[in-house]
Image (cartoon, rainbow, N blue to C red):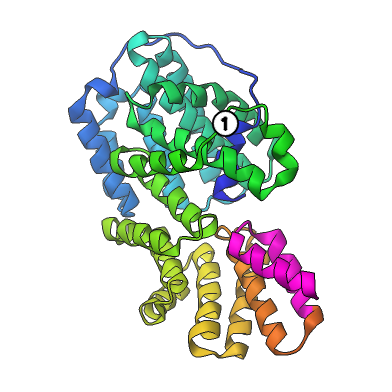
Amino acid sequence: MTRWAWALVLLLLITVSHAHSRPTAGPYLLQDSAAMAEVKRGIDLMYNYQFAEATTVFETLRPRYGKHPLYPFVHALLLYWKELPILHSSAATASLRALLEESITLAEGLRKDPDGAVEGSFFALFSHALLAKTYADEEETMKAVNEARKAYPYLKEGFEYQRQYAEFYISTGLYNYYRERYPQLYPVYKPFVYFFADGNMALGLQQLEKATREGVFTRMEAFRFLIHIYISYEENTAKGHRLAAEAHRLYPQNTYFRMIMTETLLLTHQYTAARPRIDALLREDNTYYRIAAHLFDGWWQEKAAHALEAAQKAYRQAIALQTTYRYAPDDMLGWAHAGLARIAIVQENPDEARAQYKQALKSTSDLSVHREAEAYLRKH
């Protein structure tokens, strides 16, 4: 499921379902600047793929915050990034879900204390959201929707709390943006979203930008969403590239950000700079990144080297790897199918071009790919 899809699942249902737990009394993270400094240090290490060092930092929080949702939440976030993407039925998936369930239980208890309500709401919201994502990734739709339903009341509270706690700017920003963008992408859902409060795409982008400046837990997640939005929906590749370059500058050892940086170099036609990065990704052990690398190689061969046979081979390798591996970076398979369609057009094979463009439409929500595919299919 794409990034927007699991974020938007928070909007699906209004019914509130709370588990009850015994209230806890402190400590309160919002009042502990020293602890937050350590949290930020650990998160910086985590995003730079220095997982052992990050774990050591997070463990220093255990004496004071071992019974606070912070402790299981940061360990869940670390596990998510360490195992990206987490495979179906793996021990890592089970561990991640257990940590998130623990965070939710502690967060709901913390919310019963007025002094802990804001941070309790934050940890409950994002623990449910990440739990929903794990189910959505495994196509366990009903479980994902159930977690989204539980997250919805905390999403609403975020609109009240965002000025007190900047971490909520990511959730309010995503709501404001996708509440308007989603029915544009899928008009069939317009009657359904009518029942939700109006959004504001421009305001949503501003709030996400604010999250990239002021968030600690959510800062780099806001980067990820914004890069995707600017590339796929706003079609502002220059802005997407600037954000990707900044993420890579901050965390040069982060393979995911290296992948996104490579993507945006290609989108902005910086082919010379992209080539060594593609080669480095091709050497990665993680199949997830090699799928992207083969796509990027196909793109480079098609657009920079004009070597269509090499491009065709690379695009097919990306698709074949995804077929056996199941996971693929968001939207990239759609681009691979679109690349094969363009090559088929040059080879004067309209049947193959139509088939590939139809598959591209099924594989991505990227507006530029949809426009390209739909324009061809209307004429052929």
Specify whether residue 255 is in view: no
Q: Which residues are magenta?
A: 352-380
Residue drawn 71% across the image and 69% down it: 375
Left or right of residue 135: residue 153:
left
Left or right of residue 147: residue 58:
left
Specify whether residue 361 is in view: yes
Residue drawn 35% across the image and 38% down it: 217
Left or right of residue 84: residue 139:
right
Residue drawn 77% across the image and 86% down it: 349
Q: Is residue 358 magenta?
A: yes
Q: Is residue 76 magenta?
A: no
User: In the rendered view, would you say 120 is above or below 242?
Assistant: above
Q: Amino acid at mark 1?
A: Asp
Q: Give the SS element for disc 1.
A: loop
Q: Which residue is mark 1?
A: 198
| Image location (x, y in percent) of residue 146 | 65, 29
| Image location (x, y in percent) of residue 194 | 67, 31
Q: What main secondary structure does the magenta stretch of the protein show?
A: helix
In which quadrant of the rendered view does residue 62 lie? top left
User: In the rendered view, would you say 208 is above or below 100?
Assistant: below
